[in-house]
Image: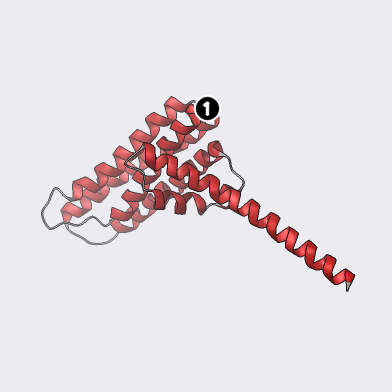
Amino acid sequence: MNTALCTLFLFLASSLILFHVESAANDIVSDTCQKSAASSPNVNYDYCVKALGSDPKSRTADVQGLGLIALNLLESSVTSTGSDIQQLLKQKQDPYVHQCLSDCSDLYSDALETTKEAVGAYQEKRFPDVQNSMSTVSTDATTCESQFKEKKGVTSPLTKQNGDATQLSYIELAILAIVKGS
C-alpha cells in the first residue's frame, strides 16, 4: 500500500511539473503575441499564437527564439507559395491571371532571398536589416495580391498565401520591437 501511494504521489508530482512547463511555454507564446498585437494593429493575435505554437521549439524558446521561429515559418511559407505559383503557371488560364502569377513568381523569388538574408541578419543581431527585409517581404506579398484586384472579376488564387506572408512579416516586426526594447 505504501509503494502504491508513493507511485501515485510521484505520478501526480511529475504531471504537475509537466503541466507547469507546458503552461510556461504557452505563456511565452501568448504573452509575445499579446504584446505584438497590442503594439501593431496589423498583427492578428490568434494567427500569431497558432503560427508560433505550431513549432515545437516554441515550447522552450525565449522571445528572441520566437523571432527566429517566426522567420523560419516565413521562409517556409514563402518557399511553399513559390512552389504553388509554379504549379499554377503550368495550368491553362486567362492571360491576365497568368501575367499576375508570373509577376508574383518574381516577387516571391525576391521574398525568398530576402527572408533567407533576414535569418542570417537576425542571428547576427543586425535587427535594422531584418526590419528592412520584413518590410520588403510584406510589400512583395501585398503587391502580388493587389495586382489581381486591378481587373474586375479576377480573383487571386494566392489570397491565403499572401496573407500568411504578410502576417508573419508583421509578427516578426513586432517581435523585433520587443527584443530591441528588452
Residue at 52 percent of width and 39 percent of height = 68
Give the left or right position of residue 103, taking residue 171 as reference.
left
Total numbered circles:
1
- Comparing 39 with 68, the one in front is 39
Give the left or right position of residue 113, taking residue 6 as reference.
left
| Relative to 146, residue 123 above or below | above
- Comparing 82 with 48, the one in front is 48
Question: What percent of the width, then of the height, locates residue 101?
Answer: 26, 50
Task: Pick the quarter of the image with the N terminus.
Answer: bottom right
What colour-coding does the image apply?
secondary structure
Question: What percent of the width, then of the height, locates residue 95?
Answer: 17, 54
Looking at the image, the residue that sits furthest to the right is: 2
Classed neighbour count for the residue bearing mark 1: other residues with Cα under 10 Å, few (<14), some (14–19), many (≥20): some
Element at label 1: loop
Residue type, label 1: Lys
Question: What percent of the width, then of the height, locates residue 98?
Answer: 22, 53
Residue at 20 percent of width and 60 percent of height = 93
Identify the residue under disc 1: 125
Residue at 40 percent of width and 53 percent of height = 46
| Residue 117 in sight from this viewpoint | no
| Residue 154 in sight from this viewpoint | yes
Looking at the image, the residue that sits furthest to the left is: 152
- Quarter of image, res 158: bottom left
Give the left or right position of residue 5, taking residue 72 as reference.
right
Question: What percent of the width, then of the height, locates residue 181?
Answer: 48, 27
Residue at 76 percent of width and 64 percent of height = 11
